[in-house]
Image (tube, helix red, strand yellow):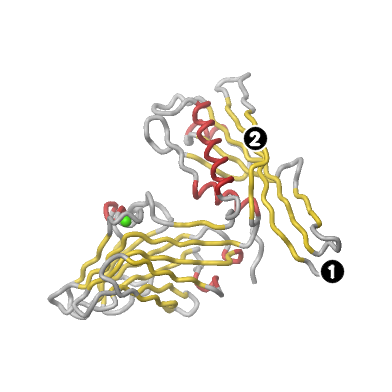
Amino acid sequence: MSELEDPVATLLRLINSRIRVTKDNGEAAKLLASEAAFDREILLKEYDAQITLQVDPVLGVQDQKLNLSGSLRRQVHFFKCTVHTIDKVAPGADAGRVMRNKVTEQIKAIIRENRTLPYQTIYNFAGIGYPEGDPHKAYAAGAASELAPSAAGWTELTNLEYQGIWYSDDVRYSKSVAVNNQYGLMLFRFKVGPREQCVKSLVLSFEGYGTAPGGNGVTVKVWNHIAGAWQYAQYGTAGTDETLTITISANWTDYIDSDGYVWMIARTTNPSNGVTPAVVYCDYVQLTVQVRGITNCDVVSYKPIDIVEVKPFLFKTEFVLKGWAFENITLG
Ligand SMILES: [Ca+2]
């Protein structure tokens, strides 16, 4: 049973997963994008900017009839999206107005550039390291079989090792195993944002390769937590980078566990012989998730609404955004 995702959740994920703002000193700005309401305390203490999103209280949702009978319809959702910044006294902080303008440009770019794909999110490991929080994780092991995600044999990558899988840049992480009959294994855990009931597509991809005395090749699979089995096997045969893709076409909830994780394994197709190692190389991995929900989005308008009567000044941009979805309804 699938359901439509709340459009506010869809747009917030779009913004959160793509927004990157660099401060004048070269550091990444710390941003909070959430449902309304604005929190002055949290902005003063912890963040360089706060972005709030809600259904526009004036424009709301329009239900448009697209044909004479009214069977083809379009639901247009309007949103109020507000950027909030202040002049911070913290060292290294941008001036409030400068930060506001940077965040405004980012929101504008993200919404316009993803006009036809607001429902798609690409998850990867860029910027992630050990032992940071709850999100995506990567592990390696040597074993004679495909270990389950919960097996004890996995070791998480180190901070430096994670950097090998951040980007598709020919800088790779590799796991070498020289025990007879053992494979080089890697395990990837992706933390998926949406409610699993809203998911309509999961696509995993692995860029890398494997080498072993019995021949080149890497095998990738995804974990079915209901069946307790690795499934959707894809095989590579090269001794240089190739991209293997797993497309899950049905029963998505079987592949998203109760913690919201999707698990992928990669192993050398052939084992070590105890003399020559089996080595699995990974340049990059990603998970692309699509949800059922709004299919388009756009910017309607925006304006600065600074509040400079009280200190610290509050710099704000207020956007009106829209998102829409088509419906084909059965008439009685
Ligand atoms: Ca890489």
Q: Secondary structure at mark 1?
A: loop
Q: Nearer the viewer, residue 158 or 217?
A: 217
Q: CA distance from mark 1 to mark 2?
A: 38 Å
Residue indicated by mark 2: 302
Report which quarter residue 310 is drawn in. top right
Residue at x-position 37% and y-position 51%: 128
- Residue 2: mark: none
Q: Nearer the viewer, residue 42 or 201?
A: 201
- Residue 331: mark: 1
Residue at x-position 36% and y-position 76%: 235
Quadrant in which ligand 1 is drawn: bottom left
For the N terminus, which image quadrant? bottom right
Q: Which amino acid type is shown beneath numbered disc 2?
A: Tyr
Q: Earlier in the sequence, mark 1 or mark 2?
A: 2
In the picture, measured across the screen, residue 73 lies left or right of residue 105, that is right
Residue 73 in the image: state x and y as whole percent.
77, 59
Rendered position, 289 above or below 106: below
- Does the image show residue 331? yes
Check contact, mark 1 vs mark 2: CB within 8 A.
no
Rendered position, 82 above or below 204: above
Residue 168 in the image: state x and y as whole percent.
35, 56
